[in-house]
Image (cartoon, rainbow, N blue to C red):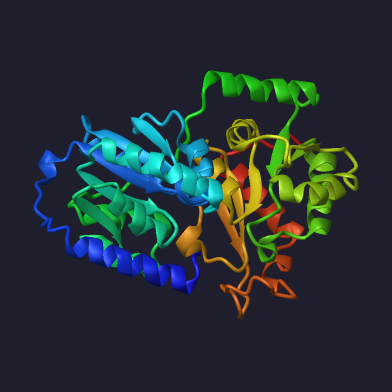
Amino acid sequence: MPNRVFLYLLKGGFRIAKYFDGRKLSYNIKDISNILLLNTTAMGDTLLSTPAIRALREVFPEARITSFVSPVAKEILLNNPNINRLIDYPGRINLPFFFRLPGILRDLRRERFDISIVLDSNDPEAGTFSYLSGAPIRVGWQESQLSFLFNIPVVKRVEGLHVVDIKFKTLEALGINAHERKPEIFLTMEEERRADEILKKEGLLKDKIFGIHPFGAKRNRWWPEEYVILLSNYLFEKYGFKTIIFGGKKEVTFAERISSRIKERPFVATGKVGIRESAALIKRCSFLICPDSGPMHLAQAVGIPTIALFGPADPASTGPTGGKNIIIRKEIECSPCRDYDCSHISCMKEIRVDDILVAIKEMKKKGWINLLE
């Protein structure tokens, strides 16, 4: 987030530019044929945007749809048939960014978009790139610090409304109604093949496996290491399940420490595979266990039963939306919360191994998984 001085100058500069702009909002939705989407945040946000992207394609089957993407969002939206083109957004604002900026803006303006729609983007970059794209119709967040750059502002923060539905609400401003909430990612045959090769190399290709991602964007969402070890040992001894531990490069040390204490040594995929390879590996698991995180939505996108562990986050806002999921959440007085430095993390510690086992039996009862005792 820019400092206050930079933001003040940015606001002032855009207000002057907008004053001399002179363009008036006038459009017919039937004339829209070239659409820009802003998807510049993290994995989960991007996955939760895919239902809205799918709905847009259904309404505009012949339109050219371009997505302005962060590196992470690009991984999610690669090969998505609802998108014609991806334009890279480097993300981090540093010296190289300013050298690349003129080329990025030329690329955006060359497309001559009819409309720009903010689905997920940081503030104030959302308004900045929406306006600089040159699109005459700009749909964005009313709460944005540069909301005056949108000529169709939409309320983003709605109490009790899921993120997917907030994105649908953005489309409603254009008269578009969407209902199908399942996220999606489109893997290639080569990516599927690589996942099989990884499992073969690890000796897991023909084994029963489950995935666990005990980490979260913030430490207050992590499931305790001791529980991961107890659960992995039990599931192997009782049902013959072997474990794959998922996570990013920052969690490698923790994952290795957990792995060293599990009797049937798991495959630590943590930090070794990218987003798309992780999706292909998750697809080969019987189920995934994880807190509120990107991999939770990734599992839902590839249709894998998911046990979602909710502590400080509110499942009503960010819970799984793919269908095959069980949410575990304890009624703790201080949850939900945004105390990222919480010292006790009772909301996650109260989710015990027995709670997971109950959820696994429930998945079996629903016919989602097969347990051969």
Number of numbered discs visible in the structure rendering: 0
Q: Where, quadrant-wise, is the C terminus in this rendering?
A: top right
Q: Quadrant of residue 249?
A: top right
Residue 306 relative to residue 56: left or right? right
Q: Residue at x 21, y 49 (%)?
A: 176
Identify whether 367 is placed above or below 213. above
- Residue 42 visible in the displayed image: yes
Q: Residue at x 73, y 31 (%)?
A: 208
Image x and y of residue 369, in percent: 62, 38
Q: Residue sitting at 37 percent across and 65 percent down? A: 10
Q: Residue furthest bottom?
A: 333
Kindly tell me whether residue 154 is visible in this rendering.
no
Asked whether 134 or 362 is in front, the reply is 134
Residue 54, picture quadrant: top left
Image coordinates of residue 112 in percent, x first then y, are 22, 38
In the image, is residue 152 above or below residue 50?
below
> 188 or 310, which lies in front?
188
In the displayed structure image, the side of residue 265 where residue 58 appears, left or right: left
Q: Is residue 333 left or right of residue 174?
A: right
Indicate left or right for 49 with 31 as reference: right
